[in-house]
Amino acid sequence: MNLFKPALILSFAFLAVFGEATLSAPHSLLGAQVDLLPALMVYAALNADIVTLSLLAVLGGMWFDSLSANPLGVTILPLMVAGFPIYLRRDLILRDTPFAQFMLGAAASALVPALTVLLLLNGGKEPLLGWGSLWQWLVMTAGGAAATPIIFSLAEWFGHALGYKLRTEASFREDREIHRGKKAK
Amino acid sequence: MFKQKNYLALGAVVFVAVVLLSLPTRATSRLKLAVGSWFLPLFGVANAGQQLPADLADSVLPRRELLKQIDSLRRENQQLKEQQIQTTAVARENDQLRNLLGWQKQAPWKLKLANVVMRDPANWWRTIQIDLGSRDGIQTNQPVLTDAGLVGRVSTVSYVSAQVVLIGDPDCRVSALVENSTHDMGILSASGPLDNSLVQMNYLSSSANLKPGQNVLTSGFGGVFPKGIPIGKIVSAQTIEYGLATEASVKLDANLGALEQVWVLFK
């Protein structure tokens, strides 16, 4: 079993959560922090197996919640809700076109924070909400949408650089060689 | 069969999420600290990376500039020593007067410096993580401040780090008083998700005499924050609920968006 792709996706999720917690520039410039986990869920749903997708939802959600004031586990379900339908329909999606990646990234990045806030409100928590939250939601959607094609390109580059190469059959076979003319003695 | 495997995975994820969300608070917070500790090596690397440019800049600073800085620091040190002598005399006099009146002595504040290592990645909370934990004697609900003013309070503590909930988060309400003739009191609570320099002051009486620029300090009520820590200044005030109460906007003295080092107050 090739564990390169799951390891790559989970490592990227780990670094993405760390980056979101340490880089304050997006928050001070745009008023909101962009979440890369939904974009990564889109990539995993289109390119990885169901086990990797589930692991990403569970571990990514737990990592995010552990560094945040969210209750532990609240981000897992929204991530899975964003990734699972894409996984089920992935044969019908033009996964290699940047526009499809962009739109799916936008949808996932809009859905995950909205569902997380709904779960928090349902659990009796009081997240910081107001009219400004709409702006933050737009920034998260646009940021996640823009990040999705970049994640696809990065993963493809890493795959080429570090992953196994596909074994290709040589077209030349000695036993099928057709000799024309007289055999040289 | 293929579809069944997918739905089994979905069921497993839902099960894990439900179990985590229904764990008792104590178990959840322990698990959260354990999962959060995975990031500690990365925080160490990031801190070293941040320190490196400063160290490089120090190493290439000209000698003349360094001597200038030393001279300026010596002068500042001298001034501070003089101020400290005056403050000690005033504190002694204050203690004597308190003794005469039979009031309890005021314990001096003990502060510990902490580095801010991380901010909340979620946009709907205002928290930070600092690099002091239970091994440094940090406990929950200790006030956190900068030299400008109050920042928040410690909410959860692990062995090597602690989470600080900042003013303006719905989880950090502060009893405050306005430095005016009537000493109007209210509660500071969240204002909006975008501007973290403004907070709302609620539960002020309808007769509150508020003017822009008046200082807001901690009132000492509530048992978390000691009295007299500067918080901010009144920006505007308006009567609400048909004139029955007043609400004010307060601009915080501390810049919550650019916190790098904070002080944890030990009572």
Image (spheres, coloured by chain):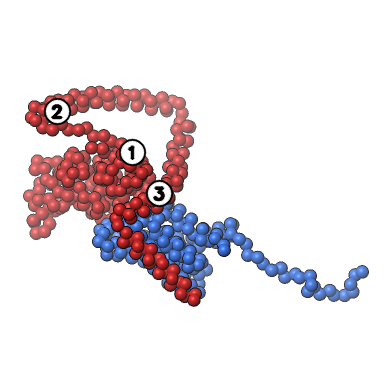
Chain colours: A blue, B red
Q: Amino acid at mark 3?
A: Ser
Of pointers 3 and 1, the one earlier in the residue sequence? 3
**Quarter of the image holding residue A84?**
bottom left
Task: State the CA–CA distance, disc 3 to disc 1.
Answer: 17 Å
| Mark 2, secondary structure of its residue | helix
Q: Which residue is mark 3?
A: B37
Question: As shown in the figure, which amino acid type bears the numbered disc 1?
Answer: Asp
Q: Is residue B175 visible?
A: yes
- Specify whether A108 is left or right of A178: left
Q: Crowdedness of circle 2 by 10 Å Cα count: few (<14), some, many (20+)?
A: some
N-terminal of the pair, mark 3 or mark 2, is: 3
Name the residue beneath numbered marker 2. B94
Is B75 on the left-hand or right-hand side of B189?
Answer: right
Which chain letter matches label 2? B
Which of the 4 quarters of the picture holds residue A73?
bottom left
Name the element at disc 3.
Answer: helix
Q: Which residue lies under the disc numbered 1?
A: B136
* Label 1, label 2: how far apart the Cα atoms are: 31 Å
Residue B77 relative to residue A38: left or right: left
Sequence-first disc among 1 and 2: 2
Mark 1: give few (<14), some (14-19) or many (20+) Cα within 10 Å.
few
| Residue type at numbered disc 2 | Asn
Q: Position of residue B200 (x, y in %)?
A: 20, 52
Mark nearest the camera among 1 and 2 is 1
In this view, B209 is above or below A107: above
Q: Quadrant of the C terminus of chain A?
A: bottom right
Identify which residue is drawn at 46% across, 28% down.
B62
Any part of residue B122 in sight: no
State which mark lies toward you, 3 or 2.
3
